[in-house]
Image (cartoon, helix red, strand yellow):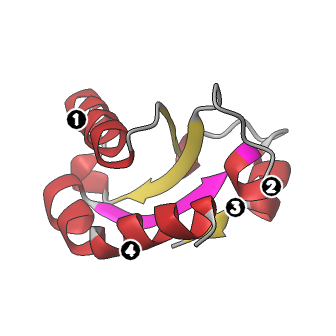
Amino acid sequence: MEKIEKIKDILHKQKEELKNRFGVLEIGIFGSYARGEETKESDIDILVVLDERFKTFDNYVDLKNFLTTLLCINVDLIIKDAIKPRLKPCILEETIYV
């Protein structure tokens, strides 16, 4: 199984916990992993949509740490609402949703 497929499978299996514990409504992968250009040094870029009640700094940090531990890869966590307008089209175009 391809690396991106393994990651998608892991995230898919955790969707219920991600929703209940962290308020994740949508989750996707973008960046080098989505393009198949990752290296050993690459982090993984993850895009999330959060329930409004979960949009806190503590929840963000907890979710980032949870995903880093779960995937055994450093995670660059981006909240969809916080993407800079000039970057948004490029990021959304390459995002692979789980």
Which amino acid, by three-letter code, is at mark 4? His
- In the structure shown, which secondary structural element does the residue marked by tag 3 occupy? loop
* Label 3 sits on residue: 95
* Label 4 sits on residue: 12
Instruction: Measure the C-alpha gap from mark 1 to mark 4.
Output: 19 Å
Instruction: Measure the C-alpha gap from mark 4 to mark 3.
Output: 15 Å
Instruction: Measure the C-alpha gap from mark 3 to mark 1.
Output: 22 Å
Percent x, y for residue 18? 25, 61
* Label 1 sits on residue: 62
- In the structure shown, which secondary structural element does the residue marked by tag 4 occupy? helix
Q: In the image, 81: left or right of 20?
A: right
Q: Which of marks 1 and 2 is in front?
A: 2
- In the structure shown, which secondary structural element does the residue marked by tag 1 occupy? helix
Q: How crowded is mark 1: few (under 14 residues within 10 Å), some or many (20 or more)?
A: some
- Residue 28 falls within the magenta-colored stretch: yes
Q: Give whichever of 78, 5 is nearer the camera.
A: 5
Instruction: Measure the C-alpha gap from mark 2 to mark 4.
Output: 19 Å
- In the structure shown, which secondary structural element does the residue marked by tag 2 occupy? helix
Q: Residue furthest left?
A: 21
Determine the residue positioned at 30% across, 48% down.
70
* Label 2 sits on residue: 35
Which amino acid, by three-letter code, is at mark 2? Arg
Which amino acid, by three-letter code, is at mark 3? Thr
